[in-house]
Image (tube, grey):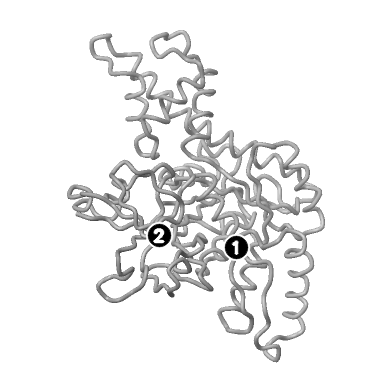
């Protein structure tokens, strides 16, 4: 799974990326600090099922804190997008190409209103324009691809033509667009695949808008939520885009907290609304003031820094994934690790889907599955639930 971080230059994308991954990346106060995309690993939170079995897990990947499992997901921070990107303005072509494999987008927006559409310093910028132009750039990028698919389809004779949906899937194959999404978008747009007069440029544009929302769902990370104009801008944003998922965030605060936690100065679990000072003597006055402001202006107002919340919502709300634990009768792998793995699967996945996700041979040799919590035997078509523990019998 790949989550793409998108937005204009200088909006805080790289700071968010560092906060989510604690990777060392270039963070600079000028456009296009990010030239090559940053790849990293973030984590989504899942209440661990080890509490059900009254054991302590030993994760093979990710980690577990106080019975909260942190499951890895891949993050991609790409070069900033500016108006005209689909025509190659700024680093647009590179930006768009880097995003092909993303399953979902988190658009980071500077809620202070102090950067314009190209990431340059300004005052009282209308932050709603960031969403409008970014969606438009993505749609025009897809429209360019759709034009090629439609022209190729229209040129063929009736005998040569494959179904239009097949032609579109082939054209968009590099973007993780599937047949079901294309068919659904055709139906929702009300277009007749057999009626050439339906497929005007305006209607093609309508089609790619629907396809983009289905295949690349997006949430908004309202970054710098502790700045003076943020509350006003947040209200403006939610009023203009009521259907968008908006998560208030302070990536800078999260970097600060994780840094102190890494040094053992404070105890802090990502996504929580509090921290505990472990070594007060190690804090200078500036750090003490920073912690006080985070507690008062972020935790007590928004409930968290929003960084962990954004990742969790991208995976579990936008993409509608569920977490499944392989759980044999002894709960341990061959090395004695208790509940070592946790897999993320699309909602609606079956026991057989889970077997195949573990290994192709397990899928091919599947006999039955066992629900580790209830001890009930289930068949291949059994639909799994979030936080199930499943044993595959082959």
Residue 33 pos. (x, y %) = 56, 59
The residue at the point 53 percent across, 69 percent down is 22
Report crowding for label 2: few under 14, some 14 to 19, many 20 or more residues within 10 A (C-alpha).
few
The answer, for residue 36, to whether it is visible in the render is: no
Quadrant in the rendering for residue 284: bottom right
* Residue 15 numbered tag: 1
Q: Nearer the viewer, residue 304 or 293?
A: 304
> Residue at position x 76%, y 46% from top?
125
Give coordinates of residue 62: x percent, y percent: 43, 68
Q: Nearer the viewer, residue 302 or 209?
A: 302
- x, y percent for residue 328: 30, 64
State the residue position of label 2.
373
The answer for how far apart the CA atoms under marks 2 and 1 are is 40 Å
82 relative to 327, above or below: above
Mark 1 surroundings: few (<14), some (14-19) or many (≥20) residues within 10 A: many
Split into 4 quadrants, where in the image is the C terminus? bottom left
Q: Residue at x 53, y 57 (%)?
A: 34
Q: Position of residue 218 (x, y in %)?
A: 56, 43
- Sequence order check: which comes first, mark 2 or mark 1? 1
| Image quadrant in which you'd find residue 273 | bottom right
Residue 177 visible in the snapshot: yes
Eyeballing the image, is 159 above or below 391? Answer: above
Q: Under tag 1, what secondary structure?
A: helix
* Identity of the residue drawn at 51% across and 65% down: 21
**Left or right: residue 283 compared with residue 61:** right
Where 228 sits versus 195, above or below? below
Horizontal relation, residue 234 to residue 347: left or right: right
Query: What secondary structure is marked by label 2?
Result: loop
Q: How many marks?
A: 2
């Amino acid at each position: 799974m790949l989550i793409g971080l998108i937005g204009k230059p200088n909006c805080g994308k790289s700071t968010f990326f560092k906060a989510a991954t604690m990777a060392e990346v270039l963070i600079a106060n000028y456009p296009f600090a990010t030239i090559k995309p940053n790849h990293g690993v973030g984590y989504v939170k899942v209440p661990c099922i080890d509490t059900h079995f009254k054991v302590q897990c030993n994760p093979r990947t990710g980690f577990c804190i106080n019975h909260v499992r942190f499951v890895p997901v891949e993050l991609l921070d790409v070069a900033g997008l500016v108006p005209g990107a689909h025509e190659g303005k700024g680093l647009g072509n590179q930006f768009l190409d880097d995003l092909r494999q993303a399953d979902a987008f988190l658009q980071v927006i500077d809620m202070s209103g102090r950067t314009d559409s190209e990431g340059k310093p300004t005052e009282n910028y209308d932050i709603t324009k960031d969403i409008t132009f970014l969606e438009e750039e993505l749609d025009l990028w897809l429209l360019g691809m759709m034009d090629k698919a439609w022209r190729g389809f229209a040129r063929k004779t009736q005998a040569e033509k494959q179904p239009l949906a097949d032609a579109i899937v082939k054209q968009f194959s590099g973007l993780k667009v599937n047949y079901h999404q294309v068919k659904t978008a055709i139906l929702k747009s009300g277009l007749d695949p057999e009626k050439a007069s339906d497929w005007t440029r305006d209607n093609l544009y309508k089609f790619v808008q629907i396809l983009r929302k289905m295949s690349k769902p997006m949430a908004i990370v309202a970054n710098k939520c502790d700045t003076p104009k943020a509350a006003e801008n947040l209200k403006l944003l939610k009023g203009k885009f009521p259907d968008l998922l908006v998560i208030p965030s302070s990536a800078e605060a999260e970097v600060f907290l994780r840094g102190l936690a890494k040094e053992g100065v404070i105890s802090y679990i990502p996504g929580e609304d509090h921290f505990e000072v472990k070594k007060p003597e190690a804090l200078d006055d500036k750090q003490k003031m920073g912690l006080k402001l985070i507690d008062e202006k972020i935790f007590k107002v928004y409930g968290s820094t929003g960084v962990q919340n954004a990742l969790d919502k991208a995976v579990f709300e936008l993409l509608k994934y569920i977490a499944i634990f392989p759980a044999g009768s002894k709960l341990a792998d061959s090395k004695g690790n208790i509940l070592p793995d946790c897999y993320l699967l699309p909602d609606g996945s079956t026991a057989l889907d889970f077997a195949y996700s573990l290994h192709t041979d397990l899928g091919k040799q599947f006999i039955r599955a066992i629900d580790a919590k209830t001890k009930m035997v289930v068949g291949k078509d059994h639909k799994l639930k979030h936080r199930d523990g499943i044993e595959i019998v082959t």
